[in-house]
Amino acid sequence: MRLVLALLLMLAAGPAFAQSPMRAEVLSLAVNGVIRPEIAGFKGRASGLESAMGALCAVPSEATLSVARQQFGLAATAYGRVEFIRIGPLMEDNRADRLLFFPDRKGIGLRQVQAILAEQDVTVLDAAGLYGKSVAVQGFGALEFVLYGTGAEALAAAEGSFRCRYGQAIAHNIGSIADQLAMGWYRKGGVAEHLTRPVQENADYRTETEALEELVGLVSHGLEAVRDTRINPFIAQGEVAAKPKQALFWRSGLTMAMVGANLEGMETLVSVSGMARAVGEADVGLDNSIGFEFSNAHRALDLITLPVEEAVLDPKQVAALSYLVILTQSLQAQIGEQLAFALGLSVGFSSLDGD
Amino acid sequence: MWQRRAFLQAAGVGFAASLLPKQLAALERSELVFASSVQTASGGYGAVLLGERGDLIASIDLPDRGHDITISREAGRGVVFARQPGTFAVVFDPSGRAAPVTLTSVEGRHFFGHGVFSPDGRLLYATESDFEAAQGVIGVYDATDGYRRIGEFPTYGTGPHEMLLMADGVTFVVANGGIETHPDYGRAELNIETMDPSVVFIDRRDGRLVGQLRLDAGLHQLSIRHMAVDARQRVWFGCQYRGAATERPQLVGYATMDGEIKLIELPPETLGSLRNYVGSVAVSANSHRLAISSPEGDLLVTVDTEGKRPVLVDTLRNGCGLAADGDGFVATSGEGAMIGIAGAEREPKRFDFLFDNHMLRVG
């Protein structure tokens, strides 16, 4: 009976793939061709942000403030490309939340940042002091308020000194975390090795199938997170009016740039790793379909040109936002369901997390 | 055990009378009845009642994805709760005589997918979220008055998941998973850094907190979610870990009304295969065995409840639903499989619908 059962389950389990060179290549390309270089890219941008904040504090002016803001955008969107990679070093030591605590539904982070600025709390100015504070005052969300929030104009002159030094401390923290991420992805015996050379002794990934499940799951969950935390919360829903101030980075106008970076990061992982090409003959069109849907998402993003508080009032841009929501659903179904099934992965109905 | 005769009595004569001959034959062959939420072949959602051999006895349609089911023979009704953060629960008559009634969560609350009836079937209780306050509540519904919501109790924690009624008939045990969610943000988990899961015992007569148990502070990211009570009134629970994947904390434990809470030791290879995720737990009819499932690891583990050690490991792709079946268990999968494990002799079956995470043994 055991044999019959095993046979039955195997037959019904969809395409059963053994360990294959193609899968090994997908895993290797995902780590070496995408994740490591993207994390290195973020590290570089974080370093640029740190320098720019240093320059702003040393020589406060409109020009240095403008450069700091520009570097903020570059660093934030570089993180946007990798923030869906919620495994390995990003998930240690609360780094994901320390880099970007969002959504902050009750605005706790904002109040904490305002209190730090109002009280000129000098304990946040050194790395150890900042590390001991709430995650919400340590990362991009807090720095956006420093650079763009009420009172940010003081940064261009000497009276913004404390505010600037706090921003500099945050930038330094972001830079340190980026360094730790980069080191983590090159650590001997670390996540990169486990993903690309899964063995039974690993606590996390013991087979190529488990490693692939993780990567496909990251994209599927990443798409869900973009929809549920970066778009849906601020667009109008039925009778409920739009709430543009619920949008991430509405102050800096980077809301949609961040969504674009998120989607680009996921698209790059799918396309460069070739995960959607490592399928059987019946599913050869899937890679193309996924690519087509990502292109549609970029076209929709290109239509959203206004700052979010104006975009939610413009019928064409509202339509583009709604279409983006649909595209994330469609991409999630293509990747989390169709691709997962085509690869014979267990990312199915019962295993969606959280229940 | 609610066997066929008792089921017929509970459902009333109309139940058998209303069945098609094939369904009646299915019930005649059945000693046990199982219930589960499902996804249908066409992609829709529903719930099914199955006989002991897996014969489909009845099904109902649901507006969206369901989760757990509770049935009261005293009330003559079953209830399917929407998967969190769902806003509906469907009350159905297993006999098919009365049309299903859909309950909608009240403003500011959503369901968490689990609930129980009072022993006399007059009240229905459901785990819900007061999402603005990020606090769990138990919604209380009057089954004798159209399931009108007549009040609520706090669960003394965030993200309550499964709730059960202890054998004394007055004490609830609730698993506060500790994870804050809000409908504005879908299923995004908003408080991973500050999670505070607990097992609580609550007096169902007045909502009084009888006791609250927490694991070590270092395990605050271990979300306690599903439970089963054995004959000694130990509450066995299964957890899902929200910390780093490289960490493999123990995932299974038990709590008692005397204030004991303990994790049992599963060996590293078993823990590795569970992938930090227990989807369902069940205790066997004789209370000697506990089964836990991990649809993420395709694994079913049977534990000796006295020795507190695993005795059997089975694999089932996407396996999650578990219910007592003889001395062993029936297990179901998100790919439509139904098998017996740990001594439950049954032919494996495969359906054209996909089972949701939980399988209820009726009775």
Image (cartoon, coloured by chain):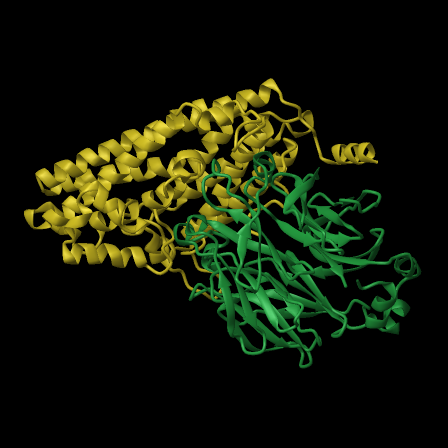
Residue A155, image x and y in percent? 13, 47
Residue A27 appears left or right of A81: right
Determine the colour of chain B.
green
Which residue sits at x=38%, y=46%? A304
Residue B41 shows in the view: no
Which residue sits at x=54%, y=20%? A25
Q: Tell which of B241 and A326 is nearer to you.
A: B241
Residue B169 appears left or right of B348: left
For the C terminus of chain B, which image quadrant?
Answer: bottom right
Q: Tell which of A201 and B275 is nearer to you.
A: A201
For the N terminus of chain B, which image quadrant?
Answer: bottom right
Q: Tell which of A263 and B146 is nearer to you.
A: B146
Q: Tell which of A345 and A62 is nearer to you.
A: A345
Which residue sits at x=35%, y=41%? A95
Q: Which chain is in yellow here?
A: A
In the displayed orientation, state which residue is furthest to the left. Answer: A158
Q: Is residue B202 above or below residue A118?
A: below
Q: Is residue B138 above or below residue B331?
A: below
Q: Is residue A337 above or below residue A316?
A: above
Residue A66, image x and y in percent? 17, 41
Residue A151 appears left or right of A325: left
In the displayed orientation, state which residue is furthest to the bottom. Answer: B145
Residue B15, image x and y in percent? 85, 69
Residue B270, image x and y in percent? 61, 37
In the displayed orientation, state which residue is furthest to the top. Answer: A21
The image shows a total of numbered marks equal to 0
Residue B164 shows in the view: yes
Which residue sits at x=63%, y=47%? B308
